[in-house]
Amino acid sequence: MLAVGTSAPDFSLPDQNGEVQTLASATTPWKLVYFYPKDDTPGCTKEACTITEAYEDFLDLGVTVFGVSKDSPESHKQFAEKYHLPFTLLSDETGEMVKAYDAWGEKSMFGTQREGILRVSYVLNADNEVVKVYPKVDPASHALEILTDIRGLSD
């Protein structure tokens, strides 16, 4: 995982609309960069939908949300439209950003070990420094956990 206090790597990736997004262009006080394995799967959908349900709170706190997986921009677009996701989904088909953010590794699924995208999240400040790392994410409660932590960091 990236360590608290380090600078987050910049990126230049297409979003669900085919527009290139960079970390440097996000000028909000906070950024949430969350990694998820695959569009439209149960855990990933739960996580995205809980962020969507709390999205007004994220906006009120000045948080830009980036969801990242190796799915294509077209897959992201279908996912975003199906669940009315109001935030940016980045397509990292090469896995370069996933690896730069240490979100790739061994994981267990149905009793078998394999490599893949880890469900990891980072909160970054206005200077794009890592201020909070979430190495193990519960998709159902993650949005609330992040909001609580950002409110605490803002005080």
Image (cartoon, helix red, strand yellow):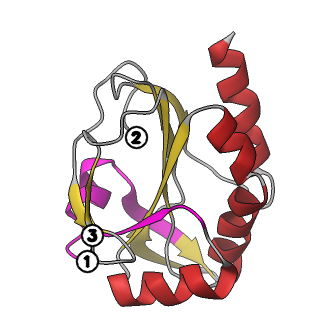
Residue 59 is situated, as x and y percent measured from the top left of the image, at: 63, 42
Q: Residues within 10 Å of mark 2 (few under 14, many from 20)?
A: some
Q: Quadrant of residue 13?
A: bottom left
Region in magenta: 86-107
Which residue lies at the image location 29% right of the left edge and 44% below the top edge? 23
- Image quadrant holding the N terminus, namely top left
Q: Which mark is on residue 93?
A: 1
Is the Cβ of the residue at disc 3 closer than 8 Å to that at disc 1? Answer: no
| Labels 3 and 2: the sequence-earlier one | 2
In the rendering, at what x and y percent does residue 79 appear? Answer: 55, 84
Residue flagged by tag 3: what amino acid is it?
Answer: Glu
Amino acid residing under circle 2: Met
**Which is more toward the observer, 81 or 136?**
81
Question: Looking at the image, is 116 positioned above or below residue 8?
Answer: below
Q: CA distance from mark 2 to mark 1?
A: 20 Å
Residue under circle 3? 19
In the picture of the structure, the residue carrying the numbered disc 2 is 1
**Does dot 1 land on a helix, a strand or a loop?**
loop
Which numbered dot is residue 127? none
Q: Secondary structure at mark 3?
A: loop
Residue 145 appears at what percent x and percent y?
A: 75, 39
Q: Give the mark nearest the N terminus, 3 or 1.
A: 3
Give the foreground label among 2 and 1: 1
- Name the residue: 73% across, 71% down: 46
